[in-house]
Each structure stands twice: as C-alpha cells, then as structure tokens.
Amino acid sequence: MLKCFPTRVCKPARARSKTNRQVRPAPRRHGCAPHQQEQIITDPLKRVQRLSWTAFALGAMAFVLAFFHRLAPGAIAGELRQDFGTSSASLGLLAATYFYIYFAMQVPSGILADTLGPRKLFTAGALVSGAGSVLFGLAPDFGLALLGRFLVGLGVSVAFISVLKLNAAWFPERRFATMTGLLMFIGNMGGLLSAVPLAWVAAQGQWRSVFVAAGALSILLAAFTWLFLRDNPRELGLPSMQQLEGKPEYPPARENWRVALATVLANRRTWPGFLSQFGQIGAYLSWGGLWAIPYLREVHGMERQLAAWHISVMIVCFALSSLAVGMLSDRIGRRTPLMRILGFINVLCWLPWLWGGPLPAAVSLGLFALMGVSISGITLVWSCAKEVNPPAFSGTSTSVVNTGGFLGPALLQPLVGLVLDVASGGAAHTPGDWRLGLAVLFAFALIGWLSTFLITETHCRNIYRAGT
C-alpha cells in the first residue's frame, strides 16, 4: 500500500490535485499536519476505488445482456419452431449462430482489448448487438432471424474479455478471481431472465417484444459506456493499481498484436484451460441454452414452466457458486484443487440424465442445482490463463482460453440436434434418441474435466517467465 506522496504534499490545497498524481513514497516534512497527509494519501485510492466500481458496473451490464441472449432460445424453442418452421437441426443452427461468431471473435476481442481498449470495444459492441436484437425480434422469416442472431453474437462477443481487461486495470491482482466470480454472478442474472420470465412472456405470445426491448437497452448502454467508462486509472491522471499497492509497474505492451498472440499461443500452459472450457462449458451451455427444456418436456413430461424453473435453479446456483469459488480461491491461494473436485462432481451429474428414468421433481431440481454449483469451478480457468502469460497480454490470453468455451456449444448444439433427427428418423424423439444426444454432451464434459489435470497451479499470482 502506498505510504505517502512526495514532498510537494505539504503545499497549499490548491496544488493538491497535482500532487495526487505523484506515486513515489517520500518522508514526511515537519510542517505537514498528520490529518492533511492522510487526506492526501487516501484521496487517489478512494477515487480509484469509486471509479473502479463504475467501470465494473457498466461492463457487467453488457455481460448480463450477453448471458440473456446466450440462453434465450431454450425458453422459446417451441415458438421458434412454430414461427419459422424449423427442424431440430435448424433450431440448433439458429441457437448456435450466436456461438459461431462469439467463438470467432474471442481472439480478435482480446487483441482489440489490449490495443484499442475496452471503452471503444464496449460501445461498438453494444450498438451492434442492440441492432441485432431488434432485428431478431422483428424477423418475419428464418433467414433474417439468423442474421439478427449473428449480429447479437457479434456485438456481445467483446463483453466478457473487455470486463476482464477492466478488472485487471482497476482492481488489485489478488482480487482478480473474486471479481471474475462476481461478474459471473451478475451475468447469470441475465441468464435467469431468459428462463422462467421469458418462458412466461412466450406463453403470452409476446416473445418478440422482449428482444426489441433488449435491443433498445443495449443502445442506451452504449451511450452510457462512451460517456462514463475509462480503460484504466491513468486516463484520469490517477496512479495505477500497481502503484497504489507499492509494486513495480507492469511493462506496457510494446509489441504489436501479432507478437502478443504468438506469445500466448506458443505458451503450452495456455492450452489446458482452452480444452477445459471446450468440454465443460461447451456441454453446460448446450444443455442449459437449448436442449434441457425440450428434454425435460419430452422425456419427463414436464410443463414448460416447471422445466424453465430447472434452468433458473441451475443458473442461480452457478451464479452464487462462481462468486464463492472465486473468493475461496483467492483466500486459499490455490486454483486447481477447486477446478478438479467440482469438475468431477459435474461429470457425475450427467449420469442420471443418460439413464433417463423417472425422477421426482425435487430430485431433478436438486440435480440441476448441483450441476450449477459444480460447473462454477471452471471460472478459475480465466485467472490461470492470465497468470501464466505476460500481464500486458491479459486480454489476449483470457480470450484464447475463452474461445474454447464457445467453440464447444457452437459444435454441440447443432450436433445434438442432428443426432436426435437421425436417431428419430424425423419422428417424435424417444428416450433412447435423447440418450444418444446426451451421450455427446457427457463425453465433452468428461474431456473438459480430465483437462484440468494439465492446468498449471499459479498460487494466485503471475508466474510467467519468458522462454517457459
């Protein structure tokens, strides 16, 4: 923690704004009153702390909208089939279009976050996703709905990596996993809106108006982002978080984006996190974002509202557990044990669905809750990715790993739909058909968990060394 500012702190109050930018500690002069010194010392820190939450709040709101769009097709699958006359495979394609462009944009998003900065990226992304959401809500046919879904995915694809970049700039390094967990908690509230509330609105025949309203909110968020967000404290003449903690400043990224990307891709410690995201998050998002509600309705005979409640329970448990896991990891100074234990529990949770036998509602709700809790361990992968790569490339490193989490559902959502169509021969899906489809998700979840045993333990600090 910064102890004191240089000798100019003893000057009159009119010069204090200038001295607040000094960051090297210096001994106190005899003429300085203790209360005056304390005020001068704490003012920059208090201002950085206050502005850090403004930056986080704006970024988190964009992530809420991203989560809403990510999981929304599952709640309105029946309406999409009816309005656009789609098969299961086409429905999977419509839902997965979001993930195709999201996947393709992760590495460019990281590079842009490291070069242009989150502020410009957030603003452009919110405008594009807003336009796409309005188009999706008003689309008269499948083609325009597909285009709208594509634009939504393009716009929100920059949100998560940009928030991680902001967290790295505005919060202490030791709190990175905690803030990531808090981000996942808040973002999952968007997923919660896409479950029971959206299912209820769809039952009233008004699903289109929800997407038009979401688009308008995105455009409003773009305006607020441009006006109030800054990429780091230095843009406001404030000391960086490293300086406020009395630590040496991380060197800026002097290399171009090609060097940054090559450095991250060449680092063998980057890839286990990618594979973990690919398997575990891929299965989770394919399940919660599209196929869980149809499965529960067709195999277990649930009403749509009860099926949607299962998704809501899973999302809430994921949100709360993500926050707890991040805080616990930072407290104990370890990453990998939590990932491996929770990942194993998540793999076990798939077995009852593969079995397909009847379950009481309380048991099925409990299983969904446990799936939400156990998938939260994967949120520590982003912290590990940042900590095994150069600090100046935090956007690029987290984006490379995050790519796996969206390549997974981009492949799995239509693949499961194709398996169902082939197995059923175009007829109604039987429990046996669903068993084949869910076997694909189970296999990916298993691969993701096994990959956590290849992730390097960082002890919650950056361990990158050139040449390793």
Image (tube, rainbow, N blue to C red):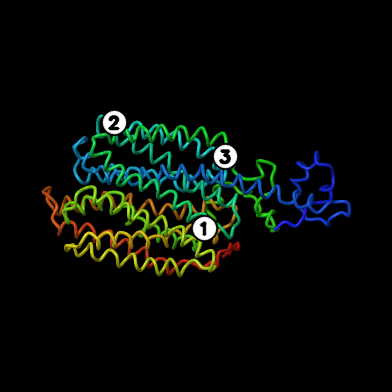
- Identity of the amino acid at label 3? Leu
Question: Residue 7 has which mark?
Answer: none
Quadrant housing the N terminus: bottom right
> Which of the two marks, 2 or 3, is nearer to us in this view?
3
Is residue 445 depicted above or below 91 in this figure?
Answer: below
Measured Cα–Cα span from mark 3 to mark 1: 21 Å
Q: Is residue 141 above or below residue 457?
A: above
- Disc 2 marks a residue whose amino acid type is Ala
Q: Whole-Å distance between the Cαs marked 2 and 3?
A: 33 Å
Mark 2 — residue? 139
Q: Position of residue 185 (x, y in %)?
A: 44, 53
Quarter of the rendering containing residue 351:
bottom left
x%, y% of residue 117?
Answer: 56, 42
Q: Earlier in the sequence, mark 3 or mark 1?
A: 1
Identify the residue under disc 3: 229
Marks 3 and 1: CB-CB under 8 Å? Answer: no
Badge 1 is on which residue? 178
Q: Secondary structure at mark 2?
A: loop
The local crowd at label 2, few if under 14, some if 14 to 19, many if 20 or more residues have their Cα within 10 Å, is some
Q: Earlier in the sequence, mark 1 or mark 2?
A: 2
Quarter where residue 360 is shown: bottom left
Secondary structure found at label 3: loop
Q: Amino acid at mark 1?
A: Thr
SS for callout 1: helix
